Image (spheres, rainbow, N blue to C red):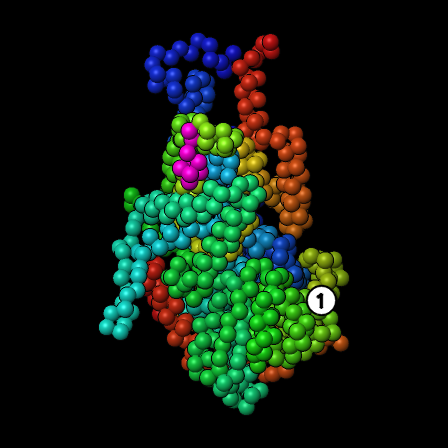
C-alpha cells in the first residue's frame, strides 16, 4: 500500500508537469514490440512520417503544427487502455488503435469522451453504421467488404460460378479473425460454395494440424485472416504442403512484405486484397524522401518507406489530415478540438482530384462520408506477390462489395449494439 | 520504541485474538484504510483509476486467491487465467440475463433469467468459479507438484478454448467478444463508459477489503491451519486428522471464488470488453503466479505487494522513460523488459521469500529499534 501511495504521488506530479501546447495531437497507439511488431512498426512509421512531412513541408495543417504522441501497447488491451487514458488529456483528435481488441475497448470510452476513432479496415465492422456509432469511422473499407471482395475476385476468375467449390477460411482465433465468418457464410449460401473454418490460436505459430487438414481436403481456395507471426507461418506451411500460392488469398492484414519475404521464392504468387495503393511509385514519396528521410526525421529506422503497411499508416494519416482540413473549413477555427475533428471526419470527401493534389493519385478509392455512412464504399482490389522482384502489384481493378449480403449484417449488428447500450440512431 | 508488544495489555480473548495484536500495526492498518476510503476517492482521475488503481486492486484479489491455493495450501496452479475467464463470462451472463433455448412447436424459444444487479453478478460469478475450481481441483487428490501444475494448465487451455468455441457464452456475438453494458449500483454507473472514477474505485475497493478480511481470517483460523498442514507435509497432516479431500477442495473453492471475483471485475469494471484468448491467456496465469512469488507465498500482504510491484513498475518506468526523459516508446518498452526482468531476478536472489519477508524483517528490526540488542 505504501509503495502504491508513493507511485500515485509521482504520477500526479508528472502529469501536472506536462505542458499544454497549441497543436494538433494525433496519438499513435503503436506496437513495436511483441508478436505483432512486424506489422505494427511499418504502420506506426508511416503514420508518424506523414505528419512530419506536413510539418516540414507545409508548416502543419492550416498553419497549426501537428504532434504525434506514440504510446507502446504491444497489442495488449490493458496497455492500450493505459495509453488511451494517458494521451486523451493531451488534446487527442483521433485514435488509431490498430488492434481490433483495443478498438472494442475504446469504442464506448472514446464515444463517452467525445473523441473519434478511425479504425481503418479493422475494428468493429458494424461501426460503418454512423447512425449508431457516432464517433467511430472505419472507411474506406472493412472486414466484410474484404470478405466480399475476395469472393468477388474468385467469382470473376471462375466465370461467375462458385457452385460446389470448397473454400477454407484460416483465421486468427480472436474477435479480428471471427469478423468475416458471417459474411462468408452468407456468401456461401448465395453462391453455393462450401465454407470450412480453421481457427489458429494466438499468436499463430502452431498451424500444423490446420494445414494437415487442408492437405487432406485440398480446398479450391484458402482465405486467410491472419496477423503478425501467423502470416509467414501459414505461407510457409502452405509452401511445405505445396498448396498452390495462386489459390491462397489473404486479407489486407495478411498481405505485406513481412509475411511473404521469410518464405522466399516459394511465396511467389501469393495474393492479398487491399484497399489502398502498394509500392512507392507515387509522387508523394519524393517529398517524403526529401523532407523526412533525408532530413533524418523518419520515425523508427526509416527503412520501411513504400512497404504495404507503411503506405497504410501514411494513408490513415492522410485521411486524418484531410479530416482536420475539413473540420477547419467547417468551424473556421485552425486549432480544432476532438468534437470538431469528428464533424470533419463525418463530412470528409476524398476524390481523385484531391488525392492527385496530395501526390497520391489513385492511392485509394474515392469516397464520401455521411452521418449514416462511416464505412465508405468498401472498394477493394487484388494484389499479388512477385518473389523475384520482391514487389506487390495489382492484378485487378477496384471492385464493389456485395452490399446485398453486408448491409443487413451491419444493420442487425449495429442495432443489437444500439439496443444493448440504449442508443437512438441519429439519422 | 513505537512498535512493540510490551505495554499493550489485552483484557479479553477477543482483543487477544485480533488480527493486528500490536497497536502500531493496527493503527497503520486503519490509517491505510482511511486514506484508501476517504482521501483517495477525491483525488481519483480517469488515468489514475484506469491505469493504476483498478488493475492493482483487481490483481490483488486474484493474487490473494492464488496465494490461498499455492501459498497456503501448497497446490501449484497455472489455471488462474482460465478461472478468471470463468468469472468474467459468468458475470457477463448474469448481468445480461442467463438464457436457455428450448424447442417448442418446432421453434427455438428463448427463456432468460432477469438481469442480475452487477454487484450480485460479481458475487455469483465467484460462486460459479468456485464450483469450476473444485471440479478442476479433483485431480489434486491424486497428483502433486509439477504434475498438478500440468493438470491445472489443462484447465487453463480447456477453459479458454471453451469460451472461444461455445457461442452461448458470448451471447452469439459475431466477434466472440463480450462487452459490459452500462450497469448501476446504488444509482452510480459502475460498468460501461459513463462511470465516475471514484465510483468504480470504491466498488472495487469494497471487494478488495472484504476479500482481504475474509482471507486473513480464514488463514489464521482452523481452516487455514489445515491448509498449511497439508502444504507442509500432507501425510503427517492426514495422520493428525486433517482430511485431505476436504482441505484441498476447500482451498480450491475459496481460491477460485476470489479469482472468479477478480475476473468478473477485470472484465466488467476495468476493461469493459474482453476477448478470452488475449485477456485470460496463459500469460495471465503466469503474471498472477509471479505476483505471489515476488510478493511472498503465504502472505496476504505479499499478495498486495506483488500486485503493486508488477502493475505499477511498468507504468512508472514508462512515465519515467517516455514522458519524462522523452525516449522513443519502443526503446522504452524494450528497456522495460530488461529492468523488470533484472529486478525480478535480483529480488529472488536477494530475498527468495518475497517482499513480504522484507516487511517481516523490517518489523523485527522495528521491535528492537533503537536498541539493537
The magenta stretch is B241-249
According to the picture, the residue beneath numbered tag 1 turns out to be A262
Q: Is residue B97 above or below residue A343?
A: above
Q: Chain of mark 1?
A: A
Residue B330 appears left or right of B301: right
Q: Pointer 1: residues within 10 angstroms few (<14), some, or many (20+)?
A: some
* Quarter location, residue A258: bottom right
The residue depicted at 52 percent of the width and 30 percent of the height is B232
* Quarter location, residue B372: top right
* Quarter location, residue B359: top right
Query: Percent x, y for residue A184?
Result: 47, 76
Query: Percent x, y for residue B240?
Result: 44, 27
Q: Looking at the image, which residue sits at the far front?
A: B239
Q: Is residue B354 above or below residue B10?
A: below
The residue depicted at 33 percent of the width and 52 percent of the height is B94
Q: Is residue B83 above or below residue B5?
A: below
Q: Is residue B224 above or below residue B100?
A: above
What is the secondary structure assignment of the residue under circle 1? Answer: helix
On the question of residue B125 being in view, the answer is no
Q: Looking at the image, which residue sits at the far bottom?
A: A159
Is residue A325 inside the magenta stretch? no
Residue A213 appears left or right of B96: right
On the question of residue B20 being in view, the answer is yes
**Magenta span: chief secondary structure:** helix
Observer-nearest of B336 and A314: B336
Number of disc labels? 1
Residue A20 appears left or right of A57: left
The residue depicted at 59 percent of the width and 53 percent of the height is A74
Q: What is the quadrant of the C terminus of chain A in the image?
A: bottom left
Observer-nearest of B180 and A237: A237
The residue depicted at 61 percent of the width and 41 percent of the height is B317
Query: Percent x, y for residue A133?
Result: 41, 64
Amino acid at each position: 500500500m505504501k509503495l502504491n501511495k508513493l507511485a500515485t504521488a509521482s504520477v500526479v506530479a508528472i502529469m501536472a508537469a506536462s505542458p499544454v501546447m497549441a497543436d494538433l495531437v494525433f496519438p499513435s497507439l503503436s506496437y513495436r514490440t511483441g508478436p505483432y511488431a512486424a506489422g505494427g512498426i511499418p504502420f506506426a512509421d508511416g503514420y508518424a512520417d506523414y505528419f512530419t512531412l506536413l510539418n516540414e513541408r507545409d508548416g502543419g495543417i492550416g498553419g497549426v503544427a501537428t504532434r504525434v504522441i506514440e504510446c507502446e501497447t504491444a497489442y495488449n488491451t490493458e496497455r492500450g487502455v493505459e495509453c488511451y487514458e494517458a494521451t486523451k488529456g493531451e488534446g487527442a483528435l483521433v485514435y488509431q488503435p490498430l488492434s481490433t481488441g483495443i478498438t472494442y475497448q475504446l469504442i464506448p470510452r472514446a464515444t463517452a469522451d467525445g473523441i473519434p476513432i478511425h479504425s481503418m479496415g479493422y475494428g468493429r465492422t458494424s461501426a460503418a453504421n454512423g447512425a449508431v456509432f457516432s464517433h467511430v469511422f472505419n472507411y474506406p473499407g472493412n472486414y466484410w467488404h474484404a470478405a466480399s471482395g475476395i469472393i468477388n475476385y474468385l467469382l470473376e476468375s471462375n466465370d461467375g460460378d462458385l457452385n460446389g467449390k470448397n473454400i477454407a477460411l484460416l483465421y486468427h482465433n480472436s474477435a479480428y479473425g471471427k469478423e468475416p465468418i458471417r459474411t462468408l457464410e452468407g456468401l456461401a449460401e448465395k453462391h453455393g460454395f462450401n465454407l470450412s473454418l480453421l481457427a489458429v490460436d494466438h499468436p499463430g505459430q502452431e498451424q500444423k494440424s490446420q494445414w494437415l487438414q487442408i492437405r487432406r481436403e485440398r480446398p479450391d481456395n484458402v482465405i486467410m485472416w491472419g496477423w503478425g507471426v501467423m502470416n509467414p507461418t501459414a505461407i510457409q506451411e502452405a509452401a511445405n504442403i505445396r498448396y498452390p500460392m495462386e489459390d491462397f488469398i489473404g486479407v489486407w492484414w495478411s498481405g505485406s512484405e513481412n509475411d511473404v519475404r521469410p518464405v522466399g521464392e516459394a511465396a511467389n504468387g501469393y495474393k492479398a486484397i487491399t484497399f489502398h495503393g502498394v509500392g512507392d511509385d507515387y509522387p508523394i514519396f519524393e517529398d517524403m524522401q526529401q523532407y523526412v528521410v533525408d532530413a533524418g526525421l523518419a520515425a523508427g529506422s526509416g527503412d520501411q518507406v513504400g512497404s504495404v503497411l507503411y503506405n497504410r499508416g501514411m494513408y490513415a494519416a492522410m485521411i486524418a489530415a484531410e479530416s482536420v482540413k475539413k473540420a477547419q473549413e467547417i468551424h473556421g477555427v485552425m486549432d480544432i478540438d476532438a468534437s470538431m475533428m469528428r464533424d470533419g471526419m463525418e463530412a470528409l470527401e476524398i476524390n481523385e482530384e484531391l488525392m492527385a493534389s496530395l501526390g497520391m493519385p489513385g492511392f485509394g478509392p474515392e469516397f464520401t462520408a455521411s452521418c449514416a455512412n462511416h464505412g465508405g464504399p468498401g472498394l477493394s482490389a487484388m494484389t499479388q506477390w512477385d518473389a523475384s522482384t520482391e514487389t506487390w502489384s495489382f492484378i485487378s481493378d477496384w471492385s464493389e462489395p456485395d452490399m446485398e449480403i453486408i448491409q443487413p449484417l451491419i444493420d442487425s449488428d449495429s442495432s443489437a449494439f444500439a439496443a444493448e447500450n440504449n442508443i437512438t440512431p441519429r439519422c | 520504541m513505537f512498535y512493540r508488544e510490551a505495554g499493550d495489555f489485552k483484557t479479553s480473548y477477543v482483543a487477544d485474538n485480533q488480527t493486528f495484536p500490536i497497536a502500531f500495526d493496527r493503527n497503520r492498518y486503519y490509517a491505510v484504510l482511511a486514506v484508501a476510503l476517504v482521501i483517495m476517492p477525491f483525488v481519483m482521475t480517469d488515468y489514475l483509476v484506469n491505469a493504476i488503481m483498478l488493475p492493482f486492486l483487481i490483481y490483488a484479489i486474484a493474487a490473494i486467491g492464488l496465494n490461498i491455493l499455492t501459498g497456503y495450501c501448497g497446490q501449484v496452479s497455472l489455471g488462474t487465467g482460465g478461472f478468471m475467464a470463468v468469472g468474467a463470462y459468468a458475470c457477463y451472463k448474469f448481468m445480461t440475463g442467463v438464457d436457455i433455448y428450448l424447442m417448442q412447436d418446432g421453434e427455438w424459444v428463448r427463456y432468460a433469467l432477469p438481469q442480475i444487479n452487477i454487484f450480485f453478478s460479481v458475487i455469483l460469478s465467484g460462486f460459479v468459479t468456485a464450483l469450476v475450481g473444485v471440479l478442476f481441483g479433483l485431480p489434486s487428490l491424486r497428483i502433486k507438484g509439477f504434475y498438478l501444475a500440468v493438470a491445472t494448465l489443462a484447465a487453463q487451455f480447456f477453459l479458454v478454448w471453451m469460451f472461444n468455441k461455445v457461442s452461448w457464452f458470448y451471447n452469439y456475438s459475431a466477434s466472440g467478444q463480450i462487452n459490459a453494458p452500462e450497469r448501476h449500483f446504488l444509482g452510480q454507473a459502475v460498468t460501461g463508459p459513463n462511470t465516475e472514477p471514484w465510483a468504480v474505485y470504491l466498488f472495487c475497493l469494497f471487494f478488495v477489503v472484504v476479500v482481504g478480511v475474509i482471507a486473513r481470517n480464514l488463514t489464521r483460523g482452523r481452516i487455514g491451519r489445515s491448509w498449511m498442514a497439508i502444504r507442509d507435509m500432507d501425510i503427517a497432516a492426514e495422520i493428525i486428522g486433517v482430511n485431505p479431500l476436504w482441505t484441498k477442495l476447500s482451498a480450491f473453492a475459496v481460491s477460485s471464488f476470489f479469482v472468479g471475483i477478480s475476473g468478473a471485475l477485470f472484465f466488467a469494471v476495468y476493461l469493459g470488453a474482453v476477448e478470452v484468448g488475449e485477456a485470460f491467456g496463459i500469460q495471465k496465469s503466469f503474471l498472477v503466479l509471479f505476483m505471489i512469488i515476488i510478493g511472498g507465498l503465504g502472505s496476504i500482504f505479499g499478495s498486495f505487494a506483488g500486485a503493486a510491484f508488477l502493475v505499477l513498475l511498468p507504468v512508472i518506468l514508462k512515465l519515467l522513460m517516455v514522458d519524462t526523459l522523452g525516449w522513443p516508446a519502443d526503446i522504452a518498452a524494450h528497456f522495460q523488459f530488461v529492468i523488470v526482468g533484472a529486478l525480478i531476478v535480483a529480488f529472488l536472489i536477494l530475498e527468495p521469500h518475497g517482499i513480504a519477508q522484507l516487511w517481516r524483517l523490517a518489523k523485527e528490526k522495528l521491535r528492537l529499534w533503537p536498541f539493537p540488542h
